[in-house]
Image (cartoon, rainbow, N blue to C red):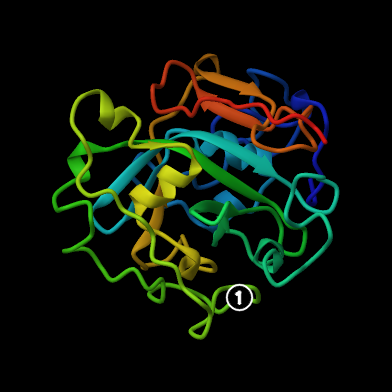
Amino acid sequence: MGGELSTSPQDHPRGPHADGGGPAGPGTHGGPLSAAPPPGGLLDRHFYDRPVLAVARDLLGATVRHGPVALRVTEVEAYGGTDDPASHARRGPTPRSRVMFGPPGHAYVYFVYGMHWCFNVVCGPEGTAAAVLIRAGSVCPSRLERDITGRDAPARSGSAGRVDLPGAAGPGAPRIEPKVDGPPPSGPGLRRWASGPGRFARALGVDGGYTGADLTGPGPLSIHQGTPIDDAAVGQGPRVGIRVGTDLPYRLWLLGEASVSRARLVRPR
């Protein structure tokens, strides 16, 4: 892909671990990764060094872990580089977007609307700029060994396992503590605990200090392989909450998941 995004979904592999090689269309697979980890295994750098839609598709069902908290990814959006009008990288490297041009497999966390952090995963070859926004997830109850507020979790400074990438929030950067609601609710409320990108980041307990964090290393923030998801269980459509690039089918989600965020269309200006 080389950082380019096609306007046609069939130009991108959607099968588990598709690497973009060979023809691929809806419900078909590209070539398999040479060393795909087993369920629960840490996703390595090669996983992220692929076309953004292939990475987005394969992140569905994966588990994002931070300390005692584990969230299963149920909804994602793909964003490219200078050719994607809705991408932060559309104007080239800036202090905020430069991390998107860096090595794949790192976190990109930005602040929106003066109240929400959004957690993204940098992918694609270095220098091309691409990232996957994690829009929603479901709580993995077996990982809630401790209070989800993080009182017994590693400190949320984002320093452990972090690389010093250009554009990453440094020690002198202003910090806004992530808002955490406390222990997750039981019953129906649990299904919406990490619904929407702001809630996902808040439940995970990450903020701008985690921009540049290496997701493939021994740090507190990591992503692990989930069980394979059949193409028939995946929905695909336009991204939401944006005013440009609304015709591109770069939003993917697990069908029937209550945690998938409710799409709110934004009218173009």
Residue placed furthest toward the bottom: 172
Which quadrant of the rendered structure holds the C terminus? top right
* Residue on which the image places disc 1: 165
Q: Work out whether 68 lies above or below 218.
A: above
Q: Based on the displayed image, in which of its 4 quarters is residue 95 positioned?
A: bottom right
| Residue 154 drawn at (x, y percent) | 26, 68
| Residue 149 drawn at (x, y percent) | 23, 55
Amino acid beneath label 1: Leu
Q: Work out whether 118 lies above or below 139.
A: below
Q: Nearer the viewer, residue 67 or 204?
A: 204
Q: Work out whether 106 lies above or below 124.
A: below
Left or right: 34 with respect to 39?
A: right
| Residue 255 drawn at (x, y percent) | 48, 17
Q: Which residue is depicted at the point 68% across and 53% down? A: 124
Which quadrant of the rendered structure holds the N terminus? top right
Q: Nearer the viewer, residue 247 or 29?
A: 247
Q: Which residue is depicted at the point 37% across and 68% down? A: 219
Left or right: 32 with respect to 228?
A: right
| Residue 187 drawn at (x, y percent) | 20, 25
User: Element under label 1?
Assistant: loop
Q: Work out whether 206 lies above or below 261.
A: below
Mark 1, residues whose alpha carbon is within 10 Å: few (<14), some, or many (≥20)? Answer: some
Q: Nearer the viewer, residue 15 or 189?
A: 189
Residue 214 visible? The answer is no
